[in-house]
Amino acid sequence: MLPPTALLFPSSSGNHHNMSFVSFLIILILLFPTLVDADCNPDEKESLLSFATNFPNLNWSATEDCCSWAGISCDDKRYRVIRLSIPDRGLRGVIPSSLQNLTSLSFLNLSCNFLSGPIPDGLFSSFNNLHTIDLSYNRLSGHLPHTWPPTLQMLNLSSNHFDGTIQTTNLQSFQSMITLNISNNSFTGTIPPICTNSPALVNLDFSMNHFTGNIPQGFDACSNLVVLSLGSNRLTGQIPTDISCALSLQHLLLQGNYLMGKIDESITNLTNLRSLVLSDNMLSGSIPHNIGKLSLLEKLELHTNLLNGTLPLSLVNCTKLQLLILRFNSLGGRLSDFNFSGFSQLTKVDLLKNQFSGELPKSLFSCKSLTAIRLARNKLVGEILPDILELPSLSFLSLTGNTFKNLSQALNILSRLGKLTTLLLNSNFFNETLPASGISGFQDLKVMELDGCWLFGQIPIWLMSLTNLELIDLSENNINGKIPGWLQYLPNLFFLDLANNLLSGGLPVELTRLPALATHQVLDQVKNDNFELPMLHVPLNASNLQYNRPASFPPMLDLSHNNLSGDIPVEIGNMKSIQDLDLSNNYFSGTIPSSISNLTNLETLELSYNLLSGEIPTSLTSLNFLSSFNVAYNNLQGSVPTGRQFETFSNQSYEGNPRLCGPPMQKLCSKRPDPSSPPSGHKKGLDMEMIYGPLLGFCFGFGIILTCQLHCMLSERTILPRWIHRYFIWA
Ligand SMILES: *[C@@H]1O[C@H](CO)[C@@H](O)[C@H](O)[C@H]1NC(C)=O
Ligand SMILES: *[C@@H]1O[C@H](CO)[C@@H](O)[C@H](O)[C@H]1NC(C)=O
Ligand SMILES: *[C@@H]1O[C@H](CO)[C@@H](O)[C@H](O)[C@H]1NC(C)=O
Ligand SMILES: *[C@@H]1O[C@H](CO)[C@@H](O)[C@H](O)[C@H]1NC(C)=O
Ligand SMILES: *[C@@H]1O[C@H](CO)[C@@H](O)[C@H](O)[C@H]1NC(C)=O
Ligand SMILES: *[C@@H]1O[C@H](CO)[C@@H](O)[C@H](O)[C@H]1NC(C)=O
Ligand SMILES: *[C@@H]1O[C@H](CO)[C@@H](O)[C@H](O)[C@H]1NC(C)=O
Ligand SMILES: *[C@@H]1O[C@H](CO)[C@@H](O)[C@H](O)[C@H]1NC(C)=O
Ligand SMILES: *[C@@H]1O[C@H](CO)[C@@H](O)[C@H](O)[C@H]1NC(C)=O
Ligand SMILES: *[C@@H]1O[C@H](CO)[C@@H](O)[C@H](O)[C@H]1NC(C)=O
Ligand SMILES: *[C@@H]1O[C@H](CO)[C@@H](O)[C@H](O)[C@H]1NC(C)=O
Ligand SMILES: *[C@@H]1O[C@H](CO)[C@@H](O)[C@H](O)[C@H]1NC(C)=O
């Protein structure tokens, strides 16, 4: 092609001034497009067009210079394509083999598409400069290919469907590799020694696969390794001691495996470590004595292991610590023997379910950055003192399952923590009285758990000022008096658990107007944010152990096991968002309002052990999500509804109502109602309570909750004690 200046010079140097200016313009206009779009190498263009025929979304125009296409970069001579970066373009189908003709590529990013099938054999064998391949977040499958460009420095295959094993031969072409990321696939087999082939390796991510066997030795070759991420696999054996030779390591992430043995003291040689995450394994022994040598440590996550001993005193030298997550271990000692004062950057401390004793450590309250503290299920004693007000950012506080005393003082102090959103104090303060007045503040509080404390008193009026409350659990106490109608003024309350108390009187109509239960809109707004730490609960069906946000809780009203009486108000049909309604084990009388059939989200309806009479409204069969329904031990009559969900309920849902008839009851429905049947079956319910009262006490008194659960479940199938209800919050 003639350079544009060669055409321009003859006319501008001649005498035809008028002509020359016009021709200059004409030539300029003619040439302009080619000036900009000096056409790219036709072979490259053809390869790209052939590549694009597979993907309608790539609207590359054949009439343009391929170097100007979106996602393409060429070399300086605009001749060869060196970068192909088309992530997140909705590309579907297999990787076209025409890609292999773009032999000058150095950078390839096809991530976040819907590419599927295997990586074609030999696809990358003819590349000489390719240093980056990002194919993450696709649907690619098959085995890891053997041949890769020897120049490859970054390979990201994360979040695909690859499987098969990784052989040493797979790694032979990884001589230049710096970042190797095959996380979140289905690779199996053992992990081969990595750094022997790839001495330059800096980031290695094999997490979230199905790797088995031991972590291989050979870390003495890993002098450049900064990130080692092998979490969420099925690795066994001990942490190899030569890992302490990888002196550049900053992030050691081995969580979610079956690793056992001790955390060797030599790990404290890794003085560049910022994250030490070994959670969810079977590691035993104590936390390394010299952990304080890791002075750059920001995250220490060792939760869910078998660690014992105390918090090593040297830990105070980890002054950069932000996360200290040690829950579910057997660590112990007097917590106040440890000096937390130096942790000015600590945001979350979680020591749930250990054996720590003594009082709340005062030094903890000088960690000004703390947003979450969980010391639940330890052996802590004493009172909550005003020092805690030195934590301006504290949002999550869980002290559940210790033996703290003086609830009035505790609430008085904690109510002044302006950022507090989640307060779990359940199973403490035994037999104290819920303060009736004198509490104000708690302006941000969303979740309050005060269940299982056997508290006396009434539902306190100061709750009315907690206008951000979303969840409150006051179950398992000795609260008496009436359910106050003013609860309706808590605009965001969608989870109200008052079960197992001594409440009397009726179900106030005002309660049916709780805005978050009466309209869907409120609920959508309130349930978005996350808890600072995952909230753990004991489920009935042990499948899901943690709730990460309020949204995980169902909209619920539980008034079971009280002394409530009177009719169930017809206005109950207002609570349109409710999923779980439990009024069982009370003295409710009258009929079951048919308005309940307007509660279209209802999944659980428990009305057993009451004095309800009349027929079961057939309109309830329109409740499509109803999966648990129980009206046993009432005084109901007539035929059991049939159809839809009601085909799935057994006679246990109906027993103790002698005048109910039709399947699954044995009694056949006669044409006329039978006036001679005996009335209520409620007496039997009372008998049950007499049996369970002492047993409940026994269980709580000795605190062996899990064992007891099993006992209680085995000994009675129809009525489960309230405290193994599926929303029992454990910490
Ligand atoms: C790619 O190169 C092969 C030969 O290596 C050739 O057969 C094929 O036609 C080329 N494909 C395109 C799209 O240029
Ligand atoms: C090609 O598609 C992109 C988005 O996918 C769009 O921004 C662009 O305008 C399209 N170009 C043409 C020539 O249609
Ligand atoms: C590939 O593109 C995605 C999406 O833009 C981006 O997040 C990712 O960092 C890119 N990969 C590389 C290696 O630059
Ligand atoms: C793939 O991994 C590389 C290196 O870790 C990273 O730069 C890139 O952003 C990752 N790709 C995506 C889509 O996250
Ligand atoms: C893992 O990959 C799946 C798709 O295979 C994806 O949906 C998921 O978000 C990925 N997980 C993470 C943590 O990236
Ligand atoms: C691996 O890739 C995934 C997805 O791109 C990313 O989230 C992760 O941080 C990467 N791992 C490393 C060590 O860079
Ligand atoms: C690593 O730690 C062990 C035990 O703590 C020690 O004996 C050894 O000298 C240390 N090695 C290096 C290289 O610092
Ligand atoms: C910790 O557990 C080990 C067994 O794993 C035991 O030998 C050791 O005595 C225990 N140490 C303490 C302080 O309880
Ligand atoms: C903390 O580090 C200093 C300086 O290295 C050392 O003298 C001190 O003994 C360490 N403290 C503890 C409790 O190990
Ligand atoms: C706790 O550590 C701080 C420094 O972080 C120090 O000033 C204070 O004296 C220590 N307190 C005790 C009781 O050792
Ligand atoms: C609480 O009171 C019950 C009797 O009502 C008693 O059995 C129990 O021991 C008391 N608990 C505490 C911690 O005082
Ligand atoms: C259900 O609600 C509608 C309107 O909200 C009302 O008209 C109807 O009477 C209610 N059904 C019952 C059985 O109460």
Image (spheres, helix red, strand yellow):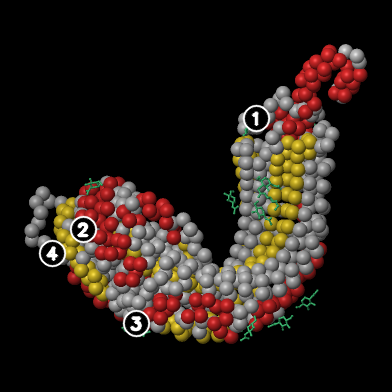
Q: Amino acid at mark 3?
A: Asn
Question: Image point 73% across, 26% down: which residue?
Answer: 64
Q: How many residues crowd around disc 3 within 10 Å: few (fewer than 14), some, or many (20 or more)?
A: some
Name the side, left or right, on which 342 lies relative to 133. Answer: left
N-terminal of the pair, mark 1 or mark 4, is 1
Which SS class for mark 1? loop
How far is mark 2 from mark 1, CA to CA? Answer: 63 Å
Question: Image point 21% across, 60% down: which residue?
Answer: 568
Q: Amino acid at mark 4?
A: Pro
Find out if the beta carbon at label 4 lies less than 8 Å from the nearest ligand 12 atom: no
N-terminal of the pair, mark 3 or mark 2, is 3
Which of the pair 222/62 is nearer the observer?
A: 62
Q: How many residues crowd around disc 1 within 10 Å: few (fewer than 14), some, or many (20 or more)?
A: few
10 to 311, vertically: above or below:
above
Q: Where residue 236 sits: x, y (%)?
A: 65, 66
What is the number of the mark on residue 569?
2
N-terminal of the pair, mark 4 or mark 2, is 2
Question: Image point 88% across, 13% down: which residue?
Answer: 16
What is the number of the mark on residue 59?
1
Which SS class for mark 2? loop
How far is mark 1 from mark 3, CA to CA? Answer: 73 Å
How far is mark 1 from mark 4, CA to CA? Answer: 78 Å
Return the residue at label 4: 679
Do the CB atoms of the residues marked 1 and 3 lie less than 8 Å apart? no
Tag in front: 4 or 3: 3
N-terminal of the pair, mark 1 or mark 3, is 1
Q: Where residue 510 sits: x, y (%)?
A: 25, 60
Return the residue at label 3: 431
How far is mark 3 from mark 2, CA to CA? Answer: 33 Å
Q: Quadrant of residue 244?
A: bottom right
Quarter that holds the N terminus:
top right
Q: Amino acid at mark 2?
A: Pro
